[in-house]
Image: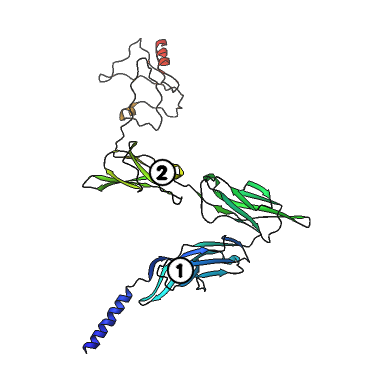
């Protein structure tokens, strides 16, 4: 009886342990387009390979997907013969294998997009983004490889380059962000005295900066006991290998030496903070926009007049912020900015200012934008 109970308990524990075994590993499958370009003509072949970064070299079974559809192939390589336009799409692969605790799978690979073109011309462009300053190579292919006479390269519908058909490859050197866009090509050739001309579909070319402009992020109260905050310098670095150094500044003064980390913990004090990313081997450096922390901006004040300097008056605009006292000024509807404003003197009361004398003139116009203090004084003297 005791043996039967022990066997039952062991069976129950095994089921509990197995139910908690993860079915997906931390491995991510890698997919590679072995046959070359991702744009091909219908009827051509495509060759893809899947690999698992497993140091133990376990026996894996491979699953293939086009979009959300699982394909019938299970080998490490996927061969598409006599391709059709319908086989265009994003391809994934995934590894799976049986273990003592059940079947496990890897994470799906990053997709590879395959475009099968049923037309007569294809512009083959790189699958990956190009960097600023590099050289872009594109190839204009025509189905059947006829002897071409003339090839034209377009960017966003505008002609960029033209060359004879013996050179189907175009090279754009010293790329800049302005070269980003949709490219296409037109090819022409002769057959028995008749000229044939075809144009390809558009192909998008991506161009990235080697070093983007940094963006500074301030995390206050990072260490409340020591009253310190954290500065993080976010930057997109697209070049391989060469190291990048970060510098941090407060009020244009550097905070310590350069560091390979994109963050710095500093004393939490008000100031104007910024950061800089620098790649010395490439002679590249870019700085972030300064960010204000803890500073209160004082309202703008009129600068003091120097001896002999005359003040210049202007009419207030609709966006000016008037104090409440300005609301007591008389207003008149439908007046333009250059129309004189007429004032009618009112009878004085004991609580108001003393009445005007008979020799004192009543002002009839306000200063316009083009009048200065001298013209106003001359007008008063004339009155």
Residue 156 in sight in this render: no
User: Is residue 154 shown left or right of residue 64?
Assistant: right
Binning the other alpha carbons within 10 Å of mark 2 as few (below 14), some (14 to 19) or many (20 upward) gives some
Q: Secondary structure at mark 2?
A: strand
From the top left corner, tell me how far across and down residue 267 is, in percent.
26, 42
User: Is residue 84 shown left or right of residue 97?
Assistant: right
Q: CA distance from mark 1 to mark 2?
A: 39 Å
**Vertical placement of 114 versus 340: above or below?**
below
Which one is nearer the viewer's eye here, 373 or 356? 373
From the top left corner, tell me how far across and down residue 259 is, in percent.
34, 46
**Vertical placement of 156 versus 295: above or below?**
below
Which one is nearer the viewer's eye here, 241 or 317? 241
From the top left corner, tell me how far across and down residue 187 is, in percent.
68, 53
Which one is nearer the viewer's eye here, 127 or 301? 127
Determine which quarter of the picture holds residue 358: top left
Q: Earlier in the sequence, mark 1 or mark 2?
A: 1
Q: Nearer the viewer, mark 1 or mark 2?
A: 2
Determine which quarter of the picture holds residue 82: bottom right
Give the residue pinned by disc 2.
Answer: 278
Q: Secondary structure at mark 1?
A: strand
Determine which quarter of the picture holds residue 343: top left
**Vertical placement of 348 versus 290: above or below?**
above
The C terminus, quarter of image? top left
Which one is nearer the viewer's eye here, 301 or 139? 139
Q: Residue furthest bottom?
A: 1
Residue 94: give its label.
1
From the top left corner, tell me how far across and down residue 228 is, in percent.
25, 45
**Render colour scheme:** rainbow
Residue 359: give its label.
none
User: Which residue is rendered at x = 39% and y = 33% of the image?
Assistant: 319
The N terminus, quarter of image? bottom left
């Amino acid at each position: 009886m005791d043996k039967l109970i022990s066997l039952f308990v062991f069976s129950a524990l095994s089921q509990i342990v197995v139910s908690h075994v993860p079915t997906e590993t931390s491995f991510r499958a890698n997919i590679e387009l072995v046959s070359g370009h991702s744009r091909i003509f219908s009827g051509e072949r495509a060759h893809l390979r899947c690999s698992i970064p497993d140091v133990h070299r376990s026996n894996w079974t491979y699953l293939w997907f086009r979009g959300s559809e699982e394909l019938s192939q299970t080998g490490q390589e996927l061969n598409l013969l006599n391709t059709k336009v319908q086989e265009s799409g994003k391809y994934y692969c995934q590894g799976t294998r049986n273990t003592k605790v059940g079947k496990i799978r890897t994470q799906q690979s990053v997709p590879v997009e395959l475009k099968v073109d049923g037309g007569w011309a294809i512009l083959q462009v790189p699958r990956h983004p190009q960097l600023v300053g590099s050289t872009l190579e594109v190839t204009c292919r025509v189905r059947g490889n006829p002897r071409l006479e003339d090839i034209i390269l377009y960017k966003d519908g505008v002609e960029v380059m033209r060359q004879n058909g013996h050179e189907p490859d175009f090279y754009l050197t010293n790329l800049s962000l302005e070269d980003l866009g949709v490219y296409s090509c037109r090819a022409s050739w002769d057959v028995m005295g008749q000229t044939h001309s075809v144009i390809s579909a558009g192909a998008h070319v991506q161009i990235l900066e080697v070093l983007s402009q940094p963006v500074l992020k301030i995390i206050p109260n990072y260490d409340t006991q020591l009253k310190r905050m954290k500065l993080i310098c976010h930057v997109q670095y697209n070049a391989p290998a060469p190291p990048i150094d970060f510098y941090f500044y407060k009020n244009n003064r550097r905070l310590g030496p350069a560091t390979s980390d994109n963050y710095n913990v500093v004393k939490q004090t008000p100031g104007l903070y910024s950061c800089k990313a620098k790649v010395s081997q490439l002679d590249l450096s870019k700085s972030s926009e300064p960010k204000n922390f803890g500073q209160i901006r004082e309202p703008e004040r009129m600068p003091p007049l120097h001896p002999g300097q005359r003040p210049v008056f202007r009419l207030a605009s609709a966006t000016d912020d008037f104090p409440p006292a300005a609301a007591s000024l008389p207003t008149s509807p439908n007046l333009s900015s250059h129309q004189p404003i007429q004032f009618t003197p009112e009878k004085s009361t004991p609580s108001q200012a003393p009445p005007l004398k008979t020799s004192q003139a009543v002002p009839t116009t306000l200063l316009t934008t083009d009048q200065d203090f001298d013209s106003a004084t001359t007008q008063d003297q004339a009155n």
